[in-house]
Image: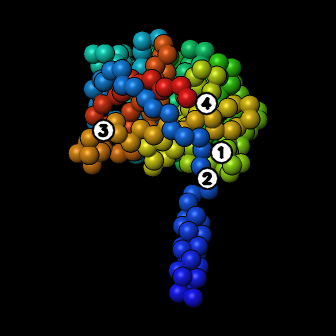
Amino acid sequence: MRSLYLILFYLILISGCSKDKPSADVPSEPDYEIINIFPHDTSYFTQGFEFVGDTLVEGTGSYGNSKLIKYKISDSQNYGEVSLSSDYFGEGITVLNGKIYQLTWQEQICFVYNFSDLEKINELSYAGDGWGLCNDGTNLIMSNGSSTLYYRDPADFSILKTIAVKDSNNISVSQLNELEFAEGKIYANIWQTDYIIAIDPVTGLVSNKFNLADLLTAEEYYESNVLNGIAYKNGSFYVTGKNWPKVFEIKFSDR
C-alpha cells in the first residue's frame, strides 16, 4: 500500500511540474558568434538602431534626453544629431527613401526628417503607443508592445494591414519592441528579456528565438538596462541595449 501511495505521489508531482512549464515556447535557441565589439555611448537609452551604408542611425528615449544621432560605428564619428523637446519620449526609428521616421512613446507623433541633414520635414499622427519601427523597402512596420505588428503607409502613416505574431504552439507573442527587417524576416527584441525573435512577415509565425543573455558581464548588466537595438549590415547583426557600453557584431548560426 505504501508503494502505491509513493507511486501516486510521484505521478501528482510530475503532473504539477508539467503545468509550470511555459506553454508559449518557440523553436530552440540557435547559437551566435561574436564577430566584433564596438564602444557604445552609455548615455544612449537606445530605442531605434539601423544602418544606412556605413552610417549608423540611433534613436534614444526618455523625457528630456531623446535624440536622433548619425555616426560611424568604427570610430564614433558624429555626422549630426537632433534633440527632441522634453515633452517627447523618443522610440523606434527607421530610414526609408531618404527619410528618417522616429516614433514617440505616448505622444502619438511620428517625426519625419531628411536623412541628409536631419531637418524635420513632417509630423505624422497615430493612435496608441509607439515602440519599434522598421521597413521592408516599401512599407513601414511598427510595434506597440502587443503581439500585433502594423504595416503603415510611409506617406500618411495609415494602417495598411496587421499581422498577429504567434509561436509554434499558436500562442501570441507580445512585448514586441525594437524591430529590424533583414533577410526576408522581421527581427524583434522582446522587451525586458534577453531574446530576439525572427518572424515570418507573411504568416506572423516565430521561426527562431535567440538567447543573448551572455553578451555582457554580470557587472555590465548590473550597470546597464535591457537588450534593445538590432541593426543589420552585410550579413551581420549589430545588437546593443539601453545604456549599454558595447555594440556587438554577431552572426546567428543556422539550425
| 223 vs 139, nearest the viewer | 223
Report the amino acid beneath label 2.
Ala
Disc number for residue 79: none
Residue visible at 57% across and 43% down? Answer: 176
Element type at mark 3:
loop
| Residue farthest left in this picture | 219
Q: CA separation, marks 3 and 4? A: 24 Å
Q: Which residue is mark 4?
A: 186
Element type at mark 2:
loop
Q: CA separation, marks 4 and 2? A: 19 Å
Density class for disc 2 (Cα within 10 Å; few <14, some 14-19, many ≥20) is few
Whether residue 5 is visible here, answered yes or no, is: yes
Q: CA separation, marks 1 and 4? A: 14 Å
Disc number for residue 167: 1
| 239 vs 124, nearest the viewer | 239
Residue visible at 30% across and 38% down? Answer: 216
Element type at mark 4:
strand
Density class for disc 3 (Cα within 10 Å; few <14, some 14-19, many ≥20) is some
Q: Which residue is mark 2?
A: 24
Point out residue 78 in the picture as x, y percentages from the top left corner: 32, 18
Point out residue 49 in the picture as x, y percentages from the top left corner: 46, 28
In the rendered structure, which disc, 4 or 2, sits on the residue that comes first in sequence?
2
In the rendered structure, which disc, 1 or 3, sits on the residue that comes first in sequence?
1
Q: Which residue is mark 3?
A: 216
In the rendered structure, which disc, 2 or 1, sits on the residue that comes first in sequence?
2
In the rendered structure, which disc, 1 or 4, sits on the residue that comes first in sequence?
1
Q: Quadrant of residue 103?
A: top right
Cβ atoms under marks 2 and 1 closer than 8 Å: yes
Q: CA separation, marks 2 and 1? A: 7 Å
| 176 vs 15, nearest the viewer | 15
Density class for disc 4 (Cα within 10 Å; few <14, some 14-19, many ≥20) is many
